């Protein structure tokens, strides 16, 4: 890639993504395959006035070796130094950039129970870190660049270099780097998302009913004082940031016990190095009471068994089918992109910031208000070209929100 384009992308992430402040620490979480770009991010951050920049390298091939050969007890403990890195950094007010670029099937040969145990151990150890980010106490941004293994999955039958080049092209277009002024392009995009948010917040829907030809037929109740968010978010100190690049969604939280019906996946879910495909979930009073999957059943089973909250929804997100990422007609096998090409839900923890007044509420009060708590938060895609969503208002009035997969407003 042209270094000038990469520099443009890195600056967009640092300035608009996490909106790094003068003297602020920065933590970059990066696969080792992305080392060149991670270093460019660090260099850019220092040029923009960062304090200390720490890079936490991830090696998915080494992780696979560990899952295949390490003793079972290894997955029941979490390294203290890593716990201190994350939990200590949030306390220090650090910003966080995560590069999401994994091989979608790296762990397909690994016992799913081992992966689930390690995931639960990590989630418990990093609970403080996760809660800080999900309540926007710290700025954070998830981005991506290609790796060879991932690119070959997205573009099978293509030579390595060509596959990587094609994935680079797709990524940079979705994050608007090719615009003459990417920052201005993002400002325009945020305004467009704000219009959708204002419409949804003004109607104060008590429920949304989803239906499509795949078999989705589900009603999702929304708690009183829920808030729709999207595009940029804010810390308590009013520092604006963008949590995902790209992003095309507006989202809120469901009422924990108010989900009833069946939802059918519209895209594969890459979860911990394994694919879950063609799956469905049946909910009753908020909880999953039945589930099926043509591929990855055991992986789905372990996701739902992570804790009690994993059996409930924590996010409702609306994304038009006619959107930039969807229109690439690329299945990315990467949640960062696929969730922004499709309406989606998330199993597990809800974002407390989607409830008015949540900053003054303790855990029990949040739960009483219908806010789900869990060690996991996993998005899965449900949007289709024929998805219809009807919102019901407090007075019983019904409003068509989505028709033929797109906003009807």
Image (cartoon, rainbow, N blue to C red):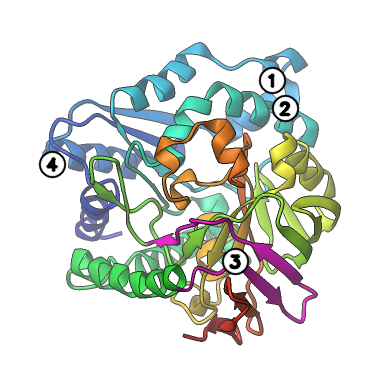
Assign a secondary structure to mark 3: loop
Question: Residue 409 — which label?
Answer: none
- Could you tell which of marks 3 and 1 lies nearer the N-terminus? 1
User: Where does the image place residue 222, in percent across and percent down from the top left?
Assistant: 59, 60
User: Where does the image place residue 174, in percent across and percent down from the top left?
Assistant: 39, 68
User: Where does the image place residue 70, in percent across and percent down from the top left?
Assistant: 71, 18
Q: Which residue is mark 2?
A: 117
**Is label 3 or label 2 in front?**
3
- Residue at the image point whose x is 37% and y is 42% from the top: 136
Q: Which residue is mark 4?
A: 48
Q: Which residue is mark 1?
A: 75
Assign a secondary structure to mark 2: helix
Assign a secondary structure to mark 1: helix
Mark pair 4, 2: CA separation: 40 Å
Mark pair 2, 1: CA separation: 6 Å
Q: Which residues fall within the magenta stretch?
A: 203-230
């Amino acid at each position: 890639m042209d270094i000038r384009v990469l520099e443009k992308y890195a600056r967009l992430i640092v300035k608009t993504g996490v909106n790094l402040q003068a003297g602020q620490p920065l933590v970059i979480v990066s696969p080792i395959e992305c080392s060149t770009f991670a270093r460019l991010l660090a260099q850019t951050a220092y040029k923009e006035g960062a304090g200390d920049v720490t890079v936490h390298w991830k090696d998915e091939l080494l992780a696979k070796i560990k899952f295949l050969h390490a003793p079972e007890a290894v997955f029941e403990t979490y390294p203290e130094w890593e716990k201190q890195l994350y939990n200590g950094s949030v306390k220090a007010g650090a910003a966080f950039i995560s590069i999401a670029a994994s091989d979608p099937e790296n762990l397909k040969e690994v016992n799913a129970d081992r992966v689930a145990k390690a995931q639960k151990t990590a989630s418990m150890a990093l609970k403080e870190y996760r809660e800080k980010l999900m309540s926007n106490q710290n700025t954070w941004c998830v981005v991506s660049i290609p790796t060879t293994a991932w690119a070959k999955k997205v573009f099978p039958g293509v030579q390595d270099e060509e596959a990587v080049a094609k994935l680079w092209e797709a990524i940079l277009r979705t994050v608007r780097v090719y615009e003459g002024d990417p920052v201005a392009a993002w400002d325009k995009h945020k305004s467009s998302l704000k219009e959708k948010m204002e419409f949804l917040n003004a109607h104060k829907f008590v429920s949304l009913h989803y239906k499509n030809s795949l078999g989705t037929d589900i009603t999702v109740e929304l708690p009183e004082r829920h808030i729709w968010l999207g595009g940029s978010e804010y810390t308590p100190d009013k520092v604006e940031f963008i949590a995902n690049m790209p992003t095309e969604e507006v989202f809120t939280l469901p009422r924990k016990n108010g989900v009833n019906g069946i939802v059918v996946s519209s895209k594969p879910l890459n979860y911990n190095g394994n694919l879950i495909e063609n799956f469905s979930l049946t909910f009753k009073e908020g909880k999953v009471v039945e589930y099926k999957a043509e591929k990855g059943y055991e992986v789905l089973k372990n996701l739902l068994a992570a804790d009690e909250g994993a059996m409930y929804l924590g996010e409702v997100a609306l994304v038009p089918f006619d959107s930039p990422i969807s229109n690439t007609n690329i299945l990315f096998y990467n949640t960062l992109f696929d969730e922004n090409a499709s309406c989606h839900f998330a199993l597990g923890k809800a974002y407390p910031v989607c409830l008015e007044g949540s900053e003054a509420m303790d855990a029990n009060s949040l739960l009483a208000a219908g806010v789900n708590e869990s060690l996991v938060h996993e998005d899965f895609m449900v949007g289709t070209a024929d998805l219809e969503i009807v919102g019901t208002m407090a007075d019983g009035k019904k409003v068509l929100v989505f028709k033929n997969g797109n906003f009807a407003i």
